[in-house]
Amino acid sequence: MRMVVRALGLAVLAWLSGLSGLGRGDDFEARRIQPWQEDARYWQYQGEPVWLLGGSDQDNLFNHPDIPPAGLAAHLDTLVAAGGNYVRNTMSSRDAGNLWPHARRADGLYDVTEFCEAYWRRFREFLDMTAERRIIVQIEVFDRFDYARDPWEVNSFNPKNNITYTAEEIGLPEEIRTHPGRRESPFFRTVPELEDNPALLAFQEAFVAQMLSISLNYDHVLYCVSNETNESEHWSGHWARFIRRHAEQAGVGVEVTEMWDPWDLSDPMHRHTFDHPELYSFVDASQNTHQRGQRHWDNLQRARQRIADPPRPLNNVKIYGGTPHGGGLEEGTHKLWRNILGGVAAARFHRPPSGAGLSELAQTHLRSMRLLLAEFDGFAAEPANELLSDRAENEAYCATVPGRQYAVYFPNGGAVQLERSDAAGTWHARWLDIEHSRWSEVQRVEGGRTVRLATPGEGQWAVLIERTATD
């Protein structure tokens, strides 16, 4: 019982400490990242609609202050220079050189009733650095891979690694050798609806309260409970409500989601976010990027329709495409374009080797996407593949602002017919050479409502067709 009281006291102290240091100002609610007031399918930040595009070479960037080649600040500057403004941040410690959240004693054991100052300082400095650069951070509070196999061997929550409790007292095994998807760890069943472990739950809540005492000071943070979980909805729901309750106590709004493990968005597990907008104010569909080609697009469109009422942003904080997941680096870049033309509000290249990260390839595609979005009114557009004919599977993808603009993306060159709803007036086209981030000269579009579009060469291209004058 003393362990529970001590942990709960720790949570309260962390929370009160955070509240005493808040410096948000009266306009915090208007500035913070939130669904766009004019169209809740997209995000707004500091009062303006914003596309979230990103890539990074680590998932837990705050825990890698010396990320090669030149440190975290340089990594973030490279992202911004390429047009990126969106990163993922797991509260994870499983990589070499990472710190764990609890205080470590001289004998190497942890005290789970005390926090590691350096770990939380890294977190605060990371949020400062991203705020300065207007980079939106999507936090994942629990990464299941920290709680099994080799990472569990060194985890500060593991009873054999701390002085706070024994395995018998806390109900945690000292060894878990199976993949976390096997759900061997009782760490994820502490809530009353499951195994009701108040002692361990109190320490978990102290950890999350400490995180929130820092993160709720910032207007550029989104929250996801877990990394690709297949645990019970009761676990996820507990933490979504916990985050919301603490935000309410702090007088701020907050956006929360969960990331479920199944690659198929029709799996019943995804219904927990699809069907509960009161709890999950946006949807992360990253696992869909395990899919390839036309299937990736089609699944995305079904998910988008599923959350149309009430509308919510659809995020992909991970774009798979590398080794071993997602079909290779080139296919990963195709997914960025299908995502944005398909109505996704946020997309980030997953870390290597499972994604392009912030490689030169990723930077090129971020730059090219920004070139397109600077000219194409994507916020007013709708996916419109039905306007394309003479099209092979996965040959081209279309979005349109009806009667005004059409954007068509070709993953691997090709030619299709585009059916315009109205050919009146003067229309022009420009081709975007995606792999070199440059526009072609403007060309006048002649003919009636049907226009043939053929890429100028092989590789990835996009074309923007727009009405520039009316009769």
Image (tube, rainbow, N blue to C red):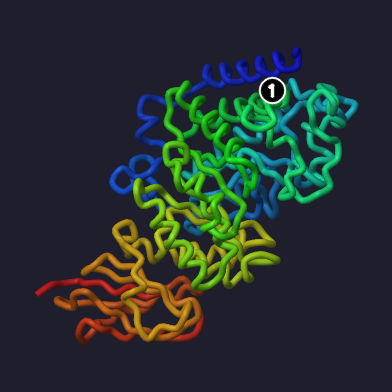
Residue 78 can be seen, yes or no:
no
Residue 270 can be seen, yes or no:
yes
Relative to 24, say whether 10 is above or below. Answer: above
Residue holding disc 1: 198
Q: Secondary structure at mark 1?
A: helix
Relative to 13, say whether 410 is above or below. Answer: below
Give amino acid for label 1. Pro
Residue 98 figure quarter:
top right
- 93 or 184, which is in the foreground? 184
Which image quarter holds the N terminus? top right
* Residue 388 at x, y percent in the picture: 34, 79
* Residue 168 at x, y percent in the picture: 85, 26
| Image position of 393 (left or right of 261) | left
Residue 345 figure quarter:
bottom left
Relative to 167, say whether 84 is above or below. Answer: below
Residue drawn at 57 percent across, 33 percent down: 239
- 417 or 260, which is in the foreground? 260
* Residue 135 at x, y percent in the picture: 50, 46
| Image position of 159 (left or right of 470) | right
* Residue 459 at x, y percent in the picture: 51, 80
- 144 or 371, which is in the foreground? 144
Residue drawn at 47 percent across, 44 percent down: 134
